[in-house]
Image (cartoon, coloured by chain):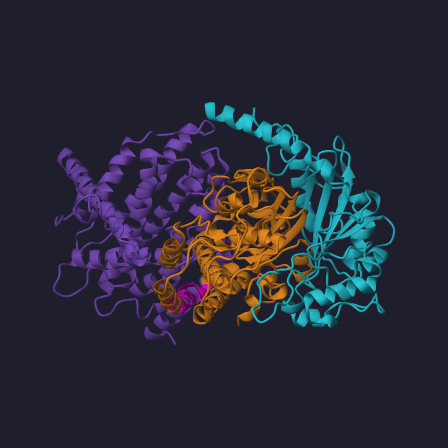
Chain colours: A orange, B purple, C cyan
Amino acid sequence: MALRTEELTFSLGPQHPSTHGVFRAMVTIDGERVVHVDPVIGYLHRGTEKIAEWKTYPQIIPYTDRMDYLSAMLNNYCHVGAVEKLLGLEIPEHAEYIRIIVMELNRIASHLVWWGTFLLDLGAMSPFLYAFKDRQVILDLLEEISGARLTYSYMRIGGVKRDATQEWLRRVDDFMDEMVKNIQGYNNLVTGNEIFQSRVKNVGVYDEAFAKRWGLSGACLRCTGNSYDVRKSDPYSLYPKFDFEIPTRTSGDVWARYIIRIEEMLQSIRIVKQAIRNLPDGPFMGKAPRNIRPPKGEVYFHIESPRGDMGCYIVSDGSDHPYRWHWRAPEFANLAAFPAITEGVNIADMIAILGAIDIVLGGVDR
Amino acid sequence: MLLNLTGLLTAPFTWLNLLWMFVEVLVMLVIILIYVMAALYGERKILGHIQLRPGPNRTGPGGVLQPVADVIKLLFKEDVIPAEADVAVFKIAPVIAFVPSFMTFAVAPWAPNVLFTDLNVGVLYFTAVTGITTIGIVSGGWSSGSKYPLLGGMRGAAQLISYELPLVMSILGVVLMAGTANMAGIVEAQQKWWFFFPQILGFVAFFISVSAEMNRTPFDLPEGESEIVAGYHTEYSGFRMALWMLGEYTYIFADGLLCATLFFGGWHGPWLPGWLWLLIKAMIFVFLAIWTRGTLPRMRSDTLMVFAWKFLLPLAMANLIITALVKAAIAGWF
Amino acid sequence: MDDEQHTNEHDESSDTKREEKPSERPPAGEAVGDAQAPAGAPHPESAPTPEAAREASQQRSGRLPESSTSPTTPTSPPAKEGEKQPAAAGSARPAGGARPAPRGAAAPQVPTWIDLEELKRLLGEGVEAVENQWGTPVVTVQADQLLRIAEKLRDDERFRFDFLTTMTAVDWRSYLETVYLLQSYEYPTHHLTLKVSHLDSDNPRVPSVTGIWEAAGWPEREAYDLMGIYFEGHPDLRRLLLPEDWEGHPLRKAYDYID
């Protein structure tokens, strides 16, 4: 005879230790088992798309920083890249290399935050501080080149704001060597831990068809065996010149997403080291018109953010500000699948799944 | 402290004896409060060291006054009671949780004849009393009139049921070897060797179950921060919150004493006085508890249950059977 | 307070200034053959023949003529070269000379993976316009044909657009337009923009594509929230980003957002 139980609905967030900001979900549970999740977002909605309609193209750059604030460099690039595509600008190779260096550094920093907070979600306190120690170094480096620690606004339409010094490049290079060792240390600390593995293996499993149906991208897609990564699949910038791999797994669980992100950090280190080695001389700013008035038309430009396929859709009416400016946030699409993944799991797994999606509410709400 | 404490309970009732008992209890309470402060400071410092940060270092030299500041803060904080709460139960729950942890010290054998009560069923008393704490946790969670504490309280109850059994089973092995359930008797039986060596299986089961009972990482499900905010004490503040903390830290100490008594020879040790040896052994246990907190992630409720019922309980039972067989063999029954 | 007043004025003045602009842009349905497509792009109907358009595209992209599909086998899957060398076949970028340009200097290219005329023919009836926007075919369809065409785009061997990147809407003042940005997991360099245009601003209704791409769920809710478009058949059409009691749809151009 089944025990008569009563369902309980509670509000997870927006002030909750593991909702990474202001995500909120109305969770209906039966005992410890999740029956239904209804995500409530918008607490960080700042109407960036509306604001962008009133700003000139260069003025939008700082607003992109504040969307997915953990990967501001990549946001900058996505917007700037879309405008450059509209204008048909040619970017000096030197500038493009520096862009790749800072973007990949930012990717590592973003993954480090994810790594720390994800383990915090699982109840491990210490890795968070280890991750932030390394992230600190990256932030210092990015601060030195861009002047800001989080909201860089470093990209310019046509190039970058400032050139990288030899000293800076050398320090980045040294830190990359150190980072490889540190990631090995992380693996020794956490990845092999039995309790950790029991928390992530076979949790939140879905298959490739599911991921495609929901339009997932990033590690959330690559954990199912699909190797879709914009840097390789639909290359932008100078990524075809670099030698790196796209880590994939086939198990489709949280464990796979974890391992993929750890390996992505190593691949990013490879890219940064190659970029520093092969950095050509040249100007850091190309010839860009002073007054940016792209031709009429619409353009979609997408890049691989740490969280997946990030895109910028611009409708230009020929004036100096976009007629419509839409942002494709990967975490927005990935989070949309959250209720479908969590049906029937227990509360602890729900938290692990949410952590593995890697949401940044600034990006989800825009 | 070095008085014949045992005599007091059996001595004829006089007002002077009552006063003495009161004074002794007060002294013990003060010792525990000092310990809790030291443990709070130690935990923050050790965790800080594990986590590559200095820990508290602003209040007093090296931050030693930090726990004092914390206690003052807790004492002067507003005592918030949620509107939905069942006020009477809400108020009494932390007391229910804390008092048993303090009661366990009654049977702690500090040195030969230095113990409050020389109970013949000391071990049984210890495990029975600790069970009461769960009632505090469940009622605290339920009476808060909030959903996260309710979940925390339920988790606490489920966890206790799962772990009380292997805990008692693993202790039974020691009791069998010592031939007594008297705490002092168990220590005396370890004159030659610690029970840790013959009872290694039992120790594994004991250590894990006792960590689970303390609600500490990796078994801190009832207060799993990232899942259910702070579990059963989410709605508590001020001094009631302090009582929960006090109970938690006192338990670590009490369980350390139990562990040292059962497996590590209690007061036995060279050179130093017996009570100091016991204290050192208990503090090593406290350090281990802090260390695991700094290094391990939290377990999931269902794996926790599976682990308790399918691994720990059989392990403790196997240990009990082996102990019984070996003891019978030595006694020449076969 | 003063600041706010000032902003208000500024916004209003620029609003009126921009008010005239949409008239410059003809409705997408009439877009065929005018300055809508950037200069230099061979427009599907202005180009004399599909072959000529294709040749022009090959000249522009410089190399890899084999990466564009042969007109003789229109239904065959796209050439595999496109996958193996995604860099060269990347629709947005012509391969440069000795010094590779990160993004195309000659801005508007044509789609390399399909010919626009062919695309129009394959999609059948209901296609109002097919245009080229920086190498991405933009297909405007009638609302009642949206589901059929969307399903075809998803399932047809030739397209396999199984990845709805995002869905959004544009307010052209006199009418609204929904935009579906499609991609393919199988052929990641292929992009296609699907549009339903000329939606009545007062009562915009579009069939929901959630049945075809589940990924459309949240973006459609967002478009409902911010643009006020009703998606018929959406399983859960509620406001997404704004509170449920919010009035108006902020991304509309006419939205008065200063109280």
- Residue that protrudes farthest toward the right in the picture: C125
Tell which of A146 and A343 is nearer to you: A146
Which residue is at a point 24% across and 35% down the rendered structure image?
B72
Measuring from the top left, give residue A327's x and y in whole percent. 60, 47
Tell which of B64 and B210 is nearer to you: B64
* Residue A307 located within the stretch drawn in magenta: no
Q: Looking at the picture, does residue A193 appear above or below residue C223?
A: below
Q: Looking at the picture, does residue A318 appear above or below residue A249?
A: above
**Figure quadrant of the C terminus of chain A:** top right
Measuring from the top left, give residue C76's x and y in whole percent. 81, 68
The image quarter containing residue C12 is: top right
Which residue is at a point 60% across and 46% down the rendered structure image?
A293
Q: Is residue A211 visible?
A: yes
Tell which of A96 and C258 is nearer to you: A96
Q: Looking at the picture, does residue B89 appear above or below residue B53?
A: above
Q: Main secondary structure of the magenta part?
A: helix
Q: Which residues are magenta?
A: A178-194
Total labels: the figure holds 0
Q: Is residue B121 visible?
A: no
Which residue is at a point 22% across and 40% down the rendered structure image?
B68
* Residue A182 located within the stretch drawn in magenta: yes
